[in-house]
Structures are given as C-alpha cells and as structure tokens.
Image (cartoon, rainbow, N blue to C red):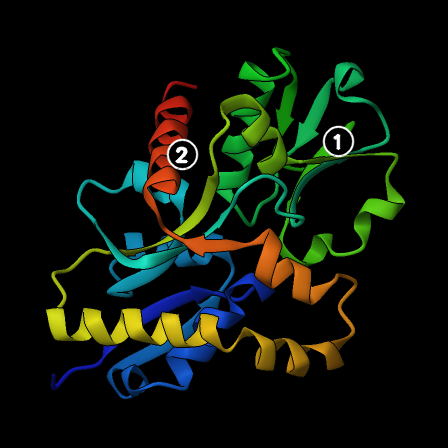
Amino acid sequence: MSDKINVSAVSYTNTKPFVYGLTHSPVAAHINLSLDIPATCADKLLNNEVDLGLVPVATLLRMPHYELVSDYCIGAVGAVNSVFIFSTKPIEEIQSICFDAQSRTSNLLAQVLMKHLWKKEVQWLSEGQADAFVEIGDRTFGKKAHYVYSYDLSECWFSLTQLPFVFAVWASVVKLPQHFLSLFNDALDLGLNNRNALIESLAKENLAIDLRHYLTQSIDYQFDSQKRLGLSTFLELASAL
C-alpha cells in the first residue's frame, strides 16, 4: 500500500487496548491515527475525512453504505460502568433529562430505555438545567458516589432485552485491502492480549475506577453473534423513536 489509511479512534480509556495494538504492531506503518471524542469520530467518517473509524453505533443509522471491520467492538454484557443517567431523583420522578453532547448513541439508548423499559415520557434537553443527565466515558469515573441515583444504561439494556449492548464498532466507508484488514484485526488482538501491561501503565494516572475490572470485565470487546443481535435490535428500536 502506498497511501496510508486514515483511522479515527475514540480517546476514552476503554479504547486504549485498541490504541496500544495499533501503535505497537506492523499496521502502525500503514495508518494515520487520530484520537477523538465519539461524536467527532462519527463526523469524520460521515464526512469522508477518515477511511475507518471506531464509531458510535448510532452513526450507522446515518450511513447509506458502510462495512463493519474486525472481530472487535466496544461492548458490554450487563453493566459497563461508564455510561449513565445521573440524577438526584428516582427514574419515576424524573421529568427532564439533558443529553450528553459527546455521544448520540448513549442519548438514543436513554430514549429507548425510557420508552420501552421505564415506559415514561420526559422532556429531552440539549443543554441547561434538568432533573437528570446522560454522561459517558472517563468523565463518569467515580461520579456514582456523588449522585443518589445512577442508572447504568448497558445494565438497563440487558434487563430489557437480555442482550449485550454494542457502543462502538469499527466501520469503513471505503473498500479496504484484505491484507490491511488482517493486519488491523491482528493489531486489535495484540492490544487486547496486552491489557495487563497497559493497566500497569495506566495505574499511574490514578483514575477513579478499578481499571483491571473495567478493561477485563466491564468492557467486552468480542464482536460476536450475540453482540451483533444486540446491535441490530438497538438500531431497530432507535430508528423507530
């Protein structure tokens, strides 16, 4: 390959195993890697600014053509511990919820759960004061202790569907060479197999979360048949909102 593949990945802690693999394997010579918040990853792929991205799954609803790449994703079976609705009120008393500007997927998931699990109508706000708010990623670490009520949206999804939830997938808008795809998949595998070393290096950052549990138990990276079913179920419910 003469030209490098432009790749965008999410900058959160849950993506660091992927980033480790992409920067410590032969595929590094074939890519230009940028780290972005989820919404930016989505925009870059939609605007053809990158060839391949780890994009929030809600992005797929806006893409007429795409190819899902690799055997891996950002997913969870039950609680994920980094995607929440936080509130000082129980869910049955909430009248308004403020979206998280960084992730359309989690906002849609909150709406799906409010409709199908909690069966309640609320006012959804893009900004301003509300009874509750959606928040994702590293900003949620340690925050449960500060709110009387916290609802892990992946755990709530599992309660509703008995299926895993997929937050982000590797998607491409161009046809990529098979040789590159093999290198790319091997790189992601390498990163996941080196999580212990990564966890030791990240421990110095003093993140307010049990990193070992988070990266080996909370996040489930295998894009298996159950996750694919969970993804298709979510996209169907989200598109009907």
Residue 229 in the image, given as x and y percentages of width and height: 34, 34
Dot 2, crowdedness within 10 Å: few (<14), some or many (≥20)? many
Q: Position of residue 8 (x, y in %)?
A: 38, 67
Q: Is residue 6 visible?
A: no
Q: Residue at x 28, y 65 (%)?
A: 50
* Quarter location, residue 144: top right
Q: Is residue 21 above or below residue 228?
A: below
Secondary structure under badge 2? helix
Q: Is residue 150 left or right of residue 134?
A: right
Where is residue 105? Give x, y as percent. 48, 40
Tell me the kind of residue under disc 1: Ala
Q: List x then y, in percent, for residue 36.
A: 48, 65
Marking on residue 132: 1
The foreground one among 16 and 60 is: 16
Q: Is residue 107 above or below residue 192?
A: above
Query: Is residue 5 at least partly visible in the picture?
Result: yes
Residue at which label 2 appears: 230
User: Relative to the observer, which residue lies in front, 227 or 8?
Assistant: 227
Q: Amino acid at mark 2?
A: Gly
Q: Is residue 176 left or right of residue 55?
A: left
Give the vertical position of 46 relative to 95 (above or below): below
Q: Secondary structure at mark 1?
A: strand
Residue at (25, 42) in percent of width and height: 63
